[in-house]
Image (cartoon, rainbow, N blue to C red):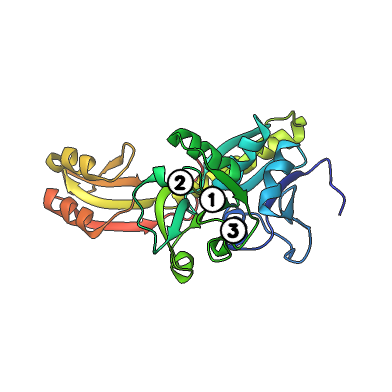
Amino acid sequence: MLIDADRLHIAIQKNGRLADISRELLKDAGLRLQNGRNALTARVENFAADIMFVRDDDIPTFVADGVCEFGIVGGNVLEEFRLSSGEPDIEVVAPLGVARCSLKLAAPETVDWSGPAMLEGQRIATSYPKIVDGWLAGQGIRASVVKMNGAVELAPRLKIAPFICDLVSTGATLEANGLRAVADVFDSEAVLIRTTRPVPAQRQALGESLLSRIDGVLTTKDAKYILLNAPSEALPAITRILPGADAPTIIPLHGRPGHFAVHAVARESVFWETLEKLKEAGASAILVLPIEKMMP
């Protein structure tokens, strides 16, 4: 498929956990993708956009070069690219709050770890040499960083390096290879990025429409719509309790002077403890509903 100059272009990871997350985000934003799992591109049926499926470490390049206006990538990949490229033509539009992981320094379980000073003069294997170099510099430590593109956890066993720095989510892979995390180097999550290069007006408008949709998805991810009844004297306390809500809508109840219906969008999780506090403050008939879509 040739790149269409009249359509928006979005780069996402071809396979893996972040690929599924990216597809789900675009689906929630109302974009219907043609099946493209085994292709390099897919056309969006109901929006003037094309999706490009690429390696995760190629996504920042596509966006920085203006080949794609937008991309979804791990913060760790973006940081490594930024440190390697100086100041690329990329803007982080929004953290997505998903695909969270940490780049951690790990040592064999048999090593009696006493602190970063143990790394002086040692070798560290990693897929993120620039991030590790920066962390070492911040610690005032001189060490040799060995770049590996995969299977980093095997480095100590193969005598390539006694220490590694790799992405960790659960720690199960480290444990399976006789390693344990000893220091946090970089915390990461998926981010939405866009190019800062000039974009034609038509695609600029499409981009703003896409951003508005994605913003709506992110805003409603943990949001709930709360409805309740309350007497007038309870309204100040109830308003303070509502979690992360803007000014609620308050409507007089027909036939019940001094009583009101309260409608509010809670932008934080609503727990049973919150409902109990609302009831204690004087609320009744409390109803909590999920929000499918909301346009800011």
Label 1, residues with CA under 10 Å away: few <14, some 14-19, many ≥20: many
Q: Contact, CB < 8 Å: mark 2 with mark 1?
A: yes
The residue singled out by tag 2 in the image is 119
Q: Name the amino acid, label 2.
A: Leu
Residue 174 versus residue 191: which sits nearer the camera? 174
At mark 2, the secondary structure is helix
Q: Contact, CB < 8 Å: mark 2 with mark 3?
A: no
| The label number, if any, that marks residue 124 in the structure image | 1
The residue singled out by tag 3 in the image is 160
Q: CA distance from mark 2 to mark 3?
A: 15 Å
Residue 234 versus residue 124: which sits nearer the camera? 124
Q: In the image, is residue 8 above or below residue 89?
A: below
Q: Name the amino acid, label 1.
A: Ile
Residue 25 versus residue 123: which sits nearer the camera? 123
Q: In the image, is residue 160 above or below residue 216?
A: below
At mark 3, the secondary structure is loop
Residue 38 appears left or right of 88: right
Q: Residue at x 59, y 45 (%)?
A: 129
Q: Residue at x 61, y 54 (%)?
A: 26
Quadrant of image for the N terminus: bottom right
